[in-house]
Amino acid sequence: MPPISPLLLEDLAAVVGPMGMLTAPGDLPAYTADWRGAHRGRAAAVVRPASTAEVAEVVRRCHLAGVAVVPQGGNTGLCGGATPDETGDQVVLQLGRLRRIRDVDPVEDTITVEAGAVLRDVQASAAAVGRLFPLSLGSEGSCTIGGNLATNAGGTAVLRYGMVRDLALGLEVVLPDGRIWDGLRPLRKDNAGYDLKQLFIGAEGTLGVITAAVLRLVPATPRRVTAWVALPDVDAAVAVLGVLREHGGSNVTAWELMSHEALSMVLATASQARNPLAAPHPWYGLVELAGPDGAVGLTAELEAALSEAFARDLLLDAVVAGSPAQRAALWSLREGISEAQNLHGPSLKHDVTVPIRRLPAFVAATASALDDALPGVRLVTYGHVGDGNLHFNLSLPPGLDPAAFLGHSGRLSKVVYDAVAAAGGSISAEHGIGTAKRAIAATYLDPVELELMRAVKRALDPRGLMNPGKVVLPG
Amino acid sequence: MPPISPLLLEDLAAVVGPMGMLTAPGDLPAYTADWRGAHRGRAAAVVRPASTAEVAEVVRRCHLAGVAVVPQGGNTGLCGGATPDETGDQVVLQLGRLRRIRDVDPVEDTITVEAGAVLRDVQASAAAVGRLFPLSLGSEGSCTIGGNLATNAGGTAVLRYGMVRDLALGLEVVLPDGRIWDGLRPLRKDNAGYDLKQLFIGAEGTLGVITAAVLRLVPATPRRVTAWVALPDVDAAVAVLGVLREHGGSNVTAWELMSHEALSMVLATASQARNPLAAPHPWYGLVELAGPDGAVGLTAELEAALSEAFARDLLLDAVVAGSPAQRAALWSLREGISEAQNLHGPSLKHDVTVPIRRLPAFVAATASALDDALPGVRLVTYGHVGDGNLHFNLSLPPGLDPAAFLGHSGRLSKVVYDAVAAAGGSISAEHGIGTAKRAIAATYLDPVELELMRAVKRALDPRGLMNPGKVVLPG
């Protein structure tokens, strides 16, 4: 890439106005490193357009000048997908000013939002018309819809509602050469040719910049029943999923799993946190069923499921949340794991999926192999067991130097990813590839798959200027 | 394309064996015309491979020879997508022998099937393990999963479960050059790079041949409540959707609409059919809620919804099915429309979507404009109103000569598609493009969209040998 010219920077400033352009060194670090500080780069400028037309004009001018563009939303990603490289020649395209809720329509059951809208604001806009926008994840207070779509975000309600891909009806996208594709249609059925929006969802901004989306809303589920359970092992967690579905059908909204190690970290670091059960147990599960106000039987469904699970020796203990506050306390234990682990020092994160029936063998074999590889390594295992998705994270053993721990990272991660591959799983369940998993993707993905991805990249971004170096490298 | 050589035919016969190759003129017509006889072509051969490896070898040899391949499943499509062209130089790749159910897994809640498996057999295999494969459409007794995926089939349960795209977890695909892409993973979450399966779903075989799929199963819904209602107008149909959702939430599985004209055709042609209500009404709706055996309250939900709809003057009459036989009779009225219309002589079919809130104005304006264009033209309007999808079909006015009627087809269809475009709808909701709507797509789709589709086609099929001439033509 050529170094960026002062003339281009002036042009871009003219497009976005003085509010929309940051070039002073002190203003840039918030955008050139990710929130964890795990990925750091440099940028020629951070450009903050306030309309789709401005995004298109910025991208068009960068394309003409041969300058690479790095789209960025809330900067809450975990794989470096929104971080510029080290050259300082890339432009960060920050979408935070493009944040309008354009339309909420309870007849169509859709919401039309701009890319920079924060997920929590989208949820609130849906709730204001008596609907649910079901995407829910830890960073929902700061992540943006554009980033959610670009990474095909998952979260805690995938079991019932799917990934954000399943909630997207239409997109507006600025293509790598600055053209605008207006696919902002609210249609449930549209088979008029290839479904182009699928290309951009989950592509991490490498094929174009999502500037707006029409998203599906679903019936609100103000009635919820929530329970925290103790489980002897992962086999039981898989079996309980079947019991829950049998009794709760599609009302089952969440089935989350945590190891005792994961809960311990939360209890050790969050002052408000306490174990909901009297005694410690090897594994814990968080189950939730939800339905509309008029729904009867949610409690009966949950109680029938728990009874059967106890009768089949799948549960060791259980507590049902008796109030919204108790429910919130249970969820905060689950949602506090990531932060608690960060407070414990460096960690190695593995966001993986394996077929659900293979989870027990996968967890057992991987735990054993990791302990062989680094005796005492702490396994902070938790995740969305109903989706086969584990955050199979590692923390350093007591007494080990953090730098020494990180020195083992390649070897430890290889143990995990080899096991994922052997189980027919995915090396990235919901966090994407970015730069963090690029080499891992190149190692573990089928060569045919990599070639297809490169062919798609070349077709849509022949000059390779749209978030280059992310997801897939030129062959 | 070059004419096919006898040597290649010998090669293909060697690959698939004597059972797998048809070249005698008498054997071909069943595969070179669609089931309605609306699309007719010729073929050098019909090749019927029995394994993925055979498909790959057939495609590889055709690719080397520069011969075009036309994939075909149950040949039940409505847009000519599986019909070869007139040259007689193309090879029809018929997938009916590739029909194994490879695996049904009630823990994973998945079914793994080969492309030629008939939809009804897939449904039955799911039911045998206590699960539901929710895709359901009129041709389910003969259409195949490969064709369902290639056309992104919809049907009568989209409101609750989505299109077949939403049910697909993984695919196995033979690429245009004969390589096999093994993406046959049963994972709910997989963000390891671009979601390649999305490219092939709905591409009508123009980017590769789907040979197998892993599909999602959902909880069985043996409990169903079904009602037939009379409606004053389409406004009421849209409003009732809101009432149904409010009371039934995600239990609402179907909300179908039929005009009186559509029902009349069924009553006039099907000897068993009778109007479920005492008097005729302008519009009819078919509603269904479904849940697991243990579900309580389905009847209460339906009754509450109907009561509210009556109180708000949205309904003129209603009858709730009292037995499985009554339910089947109601559904047969809805499902009999297509056949009844065919018995009435030539018809013009328009499978379109418009935003749900625009349905009333769309139907009114289009009906009026059509009557201006051809006084007395019969509007056989029905469809999946909960999805915004209407089959806005036309039959000839009494007394008009069929050929004269068909002579008006361009002018009449233009009225419909202009109105769809004005309403921000789609010219193809669930039937695809094939060859039938290729010119319409070229007229009504955004030029940027057409260019993107062509770029994808060139990237995956640079020689243009995979079902050429379907969906999108080279620019």
Image (cartoon, coloured by chain):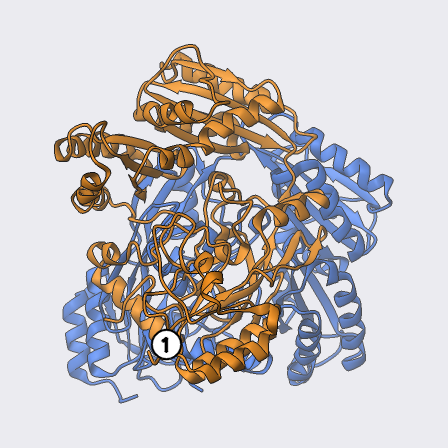
Chain colours: A blue, B orange
Q: In the visual, does A354 lie left or right of A31?
A: right
- In-front residue for pair B424/A201: B424
Q: Quadrant of the N terminus of chain B?
A: bottom left
List the single residue furthest toward the top.
B278
- Residue at left offset 42%, top offset 58%: B202
Q: Position of residue A269 (x, y in %)?
A: 66, 58
Q: Position of residue A381 (x, y in %)?
A: 70, 63
Q: Position of residue B92 (x, y in %)?
A: 45, 67
Disc 1: which residue: B459
Q: Is residue A151 visible?
A: no
Q: In the visual, does A113 lie left or right of B55?
A: left
Q: Amino acid at mark 1?
A: Ala
Local secondary structure at mark 1: helix
Q: Chain of mark 1?
A: B
- In-front residue for pair B293/A433: B293
Q: Is residue A4 visible?
A: yes
Q: Is residue A374 above or below residue A207?
A: below
- Residue at left offset 71%, top offset 56%: A258
Q: Is residue B313 above or below residue A446?
A: above
- Residue at left offset 49%, top offset 42%: B137
Q: Is residue A65 above or below residue A12?
A: below
- Residue at left offset 75%, top offset 42%: A243
- In-front residue for pair A229/A338: A229
Q: Quadrant of the C terminus of chain B?
A: bottom left
Locate residue A174: give its quadrant. bottom left
Q: In the visual, does B427 lie left or right of A418?
A: left
Q: Residues within 10 Å of mark 1 (few under 14, many from 20)?
A: many
Q: Position of residue A265 (x, y in %)?
A: 70, 60
